[in-house]
Image (spheres, helix red, strand yellow):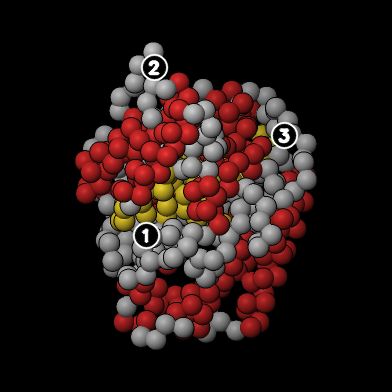
């Protein structure tokens, strides 16, 4: 007899769903329908999912159901629902990039990461909301409006993968795939009480989609409710592809991280403010790691913050300007912040672009040297708690005025350096959503980061942040 069916299925993690499929306790069709029921009940409140393929997802679920009954699953995540960020090409569903410029665009193909998920039997049921061109740290646009944080309903889930984070935190599928160009996966995961993985540059193939306006700083990335699910997803996505030579440069087998690693703790970056609740929670983890036997050293930033930030901004603005220049009449269709960024990008000189690329190369070499002395870098994932959903950024952090990227100071370096990084949820605040920390390792140590989370006594037994109640 099949095992007793747990309820509701939308509340289960990906590996719990798979365990149920294997036992015959329930099916991918049951799971997909449960996710749709949850979506119908709460999506109007959070505006996370902006396009759906109900019929296609249920057809795919039925095929997965047959495979599990025959004992022939396509992968370790066959039949698991996953949402897709609206800047990724998913055949048959709109890809608006959050912009009126693309409101009628529906791609006729999957880009490589999506094709890998489809080949693995995963249920690609819908698209998640983004800020226009995915260049801001909150989620709102002129097409679909704002997305709300399920744990703090008047606040933002962050951005640019805010729709994906809000969906997972609310029970609309256990996993979301998106992109991370400057923290776009890691910060929303922190705000929504979730785990996230930003992979090393090049490990997941990428082409046949929107122009890469952030160059190789932006990578395919994922959000989930636990590190185990992210590892299962990583194994599906990190596949060499001859059409993307970067993916052929997968690192050789590296020695494992020590069980008692050398941890560099970066509590702040210069005079940039950090919310005291965040600072306290992350500092507490640093002490726990030291108590567990890790060597923990408090450090300042191992990079030139101003130079790295300038390089990131130059690449982003010039990339956006180049893309929009091929769209006549764009000025009247994009939001004011995108318009301003594009106009600033159009002014960038060849010398400035060359300097930005030189900075990226210097940063990557310096990062490689840094991780010969340390195994992990520990820091907050965000400098601010979640702020009102209709505001682009928090203007004040810890009583100090900040600019548009003040909340995001801890994340862009990892993109410029090309390093893997994970977000780990720590706690949930009463008014400002979640607090998360960030762990970074040397290039190619994506798997090692996730294994550390599942093996370290500091992290392996931490209670999960409950799904949002709406």
Which comes before the other along the chain, label 2 or label 3? 2
Res 279 visible: no
- Residue at mark 2 to residue at mark 1: CA–CA distance: 36 Å
Marks 1 and 3: CB-CB under 8 Å? no
- Left/right of residue 72 with respect to residue 404 in the rendered view: right
Q: Mark 1 packing: few (<14 Cα in 10 Å), some, or many (20+)?
A: many
Q: Nearer the viewer, residue 436 or 265?
A: 436
Q: Position of residue 250 (x, y in %)?
A: 72, 50
Q: Mark 2 packing: few (<14 Cα in 10 Å), some, or many (20+)?
A: few
Q: Is residue 44 above or below residue 311?
A: above
Which residue is denoted by mark 2 in the rendering?
2
Q: Nearer the viewer, mark 2 or mark 3?
A: 2
Q: Is residue 287 above or below residue 170?
A: above
Report the quarter where the C terminus lies. Answer: top left
Which residue is denoted by mark 3 in the rendering?
257
Residue at the location (64% across, 83% down)? 350
Residue 236 found in image quarter: top right
Q: Position of residue 40 (x, y in %)?
A: 23, 43
Marks 2 and 3: CB-CB under 8 Å? no
- Left/right of residue 366 with respect to residue 229 in the rendered view: right
Report the quarter where the N terminus lies. Answer: top left
Helix, strand or loop for disc 1: loop
Which residue is denoted by mark 1 in the rendering?
93
- Left/right of residue 4 with respect to residue 284 in the rendered view: left
Q: Position of residue 430 (x, y in %)?
A: 30, 36
């Amino acid at each position: 007899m099949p095992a007793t069916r747990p309820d509701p299925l939308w509340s289960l993690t990906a590996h719990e769903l798979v365990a149920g499929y294997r036992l015959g306790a329930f099916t991918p069709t049951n799971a997909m329908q449960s996710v749709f029921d949850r979506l119908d009940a709460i999506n109007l409140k959070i505006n996370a999912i902006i396009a759906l393929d109900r019929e296609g997802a249920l057809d795919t679920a039925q095929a997965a159901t047959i495979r599990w009954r025959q004992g022939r699953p396509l992968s370790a995540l066959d039949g698991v629902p996953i949402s897709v960020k609206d800047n990724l090409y998913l055949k048959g569903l709109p890809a608006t990039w959050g912009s009126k410029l693309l409101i009628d665009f529906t791609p006729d193909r999957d880009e490589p990461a999506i094709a890998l998920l489809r080949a693995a039997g995963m249920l690609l049921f819908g698209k998640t909301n983004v800020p226009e061109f995915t260049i801001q740290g909150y989620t709102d646009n002129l097409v679909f409006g704002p997305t709300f944080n399920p744990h703090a309903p008047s606040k933002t889930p962050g951005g640019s993968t805010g729709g994906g984070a809000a969906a997972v935190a609310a029970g609309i599928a256990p996993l979301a795939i998106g992109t991370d160009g400057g923290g776009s996966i890691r910060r929303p995961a922190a705000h929504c009480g979730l785990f996230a993985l930003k992979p090393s540059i090049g490990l997941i193939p990428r082409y046949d989609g929107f122009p890469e306006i952030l160059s190789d700083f932006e990578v395919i990335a994922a959000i989930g409710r636990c590190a185990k699910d992210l590892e299962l997803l990583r194994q599906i996505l990190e596949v060499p592809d001859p059409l993307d030579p970067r993916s052929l440069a997968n690192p050789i087998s590296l020695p494992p991280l020590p069980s008692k690693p050398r941890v560099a703790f970066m509590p702040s970056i210069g005079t940039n403010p950090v919310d005291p609740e965040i600072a306290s929670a992350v500092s507490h983890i640093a002490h726990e790691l030291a108590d567990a036997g890790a060597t923990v050293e408090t450090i300042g930033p191992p990079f030139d913050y101003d130079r790295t930030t300038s390089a990131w901004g130059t690449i982003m603005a010039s990339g956006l300007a180049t893309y929009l220049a091929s769209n006549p009449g764009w000025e009247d269709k994009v939001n004011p912040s995108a318009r301003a960024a594009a106009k600033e990008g159009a002014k960038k000189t060849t010398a400035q672009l060359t300097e930005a690329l030189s900075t990226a190369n210097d940063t990557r070499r310096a990062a490689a040297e840094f991780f010969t002395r340390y195994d992990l870098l520990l820091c907050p994932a965000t400098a601010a708690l979640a702020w009102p959903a209709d505001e682009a950024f928090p203007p004040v952090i810890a009583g100090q005025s900040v600019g548009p990227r003040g909340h995001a100071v801890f994340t862009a370096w990892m993109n410029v350096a090309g390093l893997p990084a994970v977000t780990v949820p720590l706690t949930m605040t009463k008014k400002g959503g979640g607090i998360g920390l960030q762990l970074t390792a040397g290039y190619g140590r994506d798997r090692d980061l996730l294994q550390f989370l599942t093996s370290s006594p500091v992290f392996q037994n931490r209670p999960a942040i409950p799904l949002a109640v709406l």
